[in-house]
Amino acid sequence: MGARALWPGAALLAAAIALCLLAGCARSAAPAARPAPATVALIERAEAAERERRYERADALYREARARAPDDLSRARAALAHGRALLFWGRYADAEAALSEAAAARPGDPGAWHDLGMVRHQRGDLAGAELAFRRSIAARPDDGRSRVALAALLWKQKRLPEALREYRALAALEELPPRLRERVAWAIQTLARLTGES
């Protein structure tokens, strides 16, 4: 099996990463509880500074929100917002630290794990990315974002039977955009041919 036979997986991985980044990464399911109002206010001020392209001010406000958060939910919300901003700014090492904090504070939050997987992939930590995507899937099996990212990552690593299983699991999800469903069907067909599975 030559490199050409595996190249479509790289294209699908790039499409998955672009889709996740353009969509603002994974959005977390709304928690039953709410973060502390003071934390929310700091995050909103940080987001406003970011919209005004005052990135140093935004960074300082996100850091303050993280430092002053009175509970795990507030800390997770502040760290997740900061991590996503850092990811957008291209500060991947800092983003990984913030997203790790968010995932540790709320280990059942699939969005934090998904975004952590994306930044780890960006930094070349494929094993760490895989672990984070699997944690996201475990937290919310019906959310396709982490599953498509994991499937593409496995394909990139030439772990074709595992990638095929993930794409099949993805195809079984009910809520999948039509264009993504078409790409998943193509991936399944291609991987089935490459692996000899039907």
Image (spheres, rainbow, N blue to C red):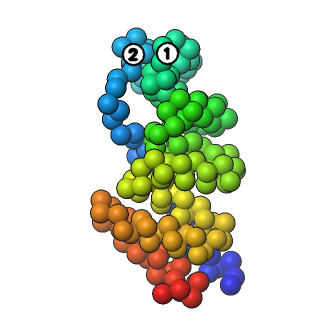
Please tell me which residue is depicted at 58% across the width and 75% down the height of the picture.
161
Q: Earlier in the sequence, mark 2 or mark 1?
A: 2
The residue lying at 35 percent from left, 63 percent from top is 173
Q: Is residue 183 found left or right of 92 in the rendered image?
A: left
Rendered view: 64 above or below 103: above
Q: Position of residue 152 (x, y in %)?
A: 55, 63
| 105 and 5: which is toward the camera | 105
* Vertical order, 45 against 16 (above or below): above
- State if disc 1 and disc 2 touch (CB < 8 Å): yes
Q: Classify 196 as above or below 74.
A: below
Question: Crowdedness of circle 2 by 10 Å Cα count: few (<14), some, many (20+)?
Answer: some
Work out whether 39 lies above or below 32: above
Give how far across and how far down residue 133 sits, in percent: 54, 51
Residue linked to disc 1? 69
From the top left corner, tell me how far across and down residue 19 is, in percent.
44, 53
The residue that appears at 53% across and 79% down in the rendered structure is: 191
Label 2: state its secondary structure. loop
Give the residue type at disc 2. Answer: Ala
Nearest the eye: 104 or 27? 104
**Residue beneath the point at 35% across and 32% down:** 31
Q: Is residue 170 visible?
A: yes
Residue that mark 2 sits on: 36
Q: Position of residue 166 (x, y in %)?
A: 50, 67
User: SS class of the residue under badge 1?
Assistant: loop
